Image (spheres, rainbow, N blue to C red):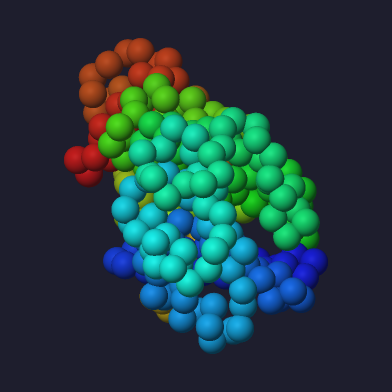
Amino acid sequence: MKGIGLEIEVIKSLTDNYIWILINYNKSSAFVVDPGEASAVLSWLKKRKINLLGILITHHHPDHTMGVEGLLNCYDVPVYGPHNSPANCITEKLQENDDLIFHGKKFRVIEVPGHTHDHIAYFSSQTFGANHILFAGDTLFGGGCGRLFEGTAQQMHGSLEKIKELPQNTLIYSGHEYTIANLNFAISIEPNNDALKQRYLNDLQKRNMNQPTLPSLLSLELATNPFLRVKNNSVISAVHEKFNINDDSEYVIFEALRKWKDIF
């Protein structure tokens, strides 16, 4: 994604992680989001002669933080992250509605617990070109959401409800390439969702060409991601049939969906 003098690029890391780089090429500087390893980032920066200005952490899991120490050995930069995180690398502790400036653009911190207790996301209050952006970590994925390693289904549902309220032209930058597996599950829930079937074909073509399916537009997630569609009748009906329940409250449907996906 490109903005005015700004770009976001991706470094593929580990098995399926994405490390996002927010770059100002005019000033040869960058911020890195969730560096799961240092070597790939250092190589990327060196090749392009880019200076690192800071590190953004969404949550404490090692595949999002293991590269911090190696980067700090080469760059004396701040490490932004959740105020309640067990990660001891964080120097700038953040909480709900904190405002930050990266490359002259304002970002707002959104607390999104569920995957972990300490999870946050970074939302650009200002647009990059035509779009807002959200560095979502492992809260919202293409076609899915994060597993509940520490938090509760109620917390995760609440976190996703926050994201649903963002502008629909928000681009979602997630921490993993899980889209095809997630869409296979989504199609089992809503086999007659035409937008979902078309998305699957489009994203499958990208993966066959070894291209990322991310970022994705929030508007597309709202149309195709079952975890954002717990009020939709077809999602409710699928859950009722699977679990033989009659409750159609959002939380109950979401919790059942998450349990279903865990064993899918």
Q: Is residue 5 left or right of residue 256?
A: right
Q: Residue at x 31, y 53 (%)?
A: 62
Residue 209 can be seen, yes or no? yes
Depth check, front residue: 5 or 200: 5
Taking the view exactly as shown, the residue that stands out farthest to the bottom is: 47
In which quarter of the view is residue 215 placed? Answer: bottom right
Residue 122, position as x, y percentages in the image: 59, 45
| Residue lying at 44% horizontally and 20% vertically, measured from the top left | 250
On the image, the x and y values in percent for residue 53 come to 62, 64
Residue appearing at x 39%, y 67% in the figure: 70
Identity of the residue furthest to the top in this view: 247
Q: Is residue 82 left or right of residue 129?
A: left
The residue at the point 22 percent across, 44 percent down is: 264
Instruction: Give the number of marks.
Output: 0
In percent of width and height, residue 72 lies at 46, 64
Q: Position of residue 64 (x, y in %)?
A: 39, 55
Vertical side of 203 occupied by 100: above or below? above
Q: Is residue 241 above or below residue 169?
A: above
Q: Is residue 226 visible?
A: no
Q: Is residue 244 above or below residue 192?
A: above
The single residue placed furthest to the left in the displayed view is: 263
Residue 12 falls in image quadrant = bottom left
Q: Quadrant of the N terminus?
A: bottom right
The front one of 4 and 78 is 78
Displayed quadrant of residue 117: top left
Which of 21/231 is in front?
A: 21
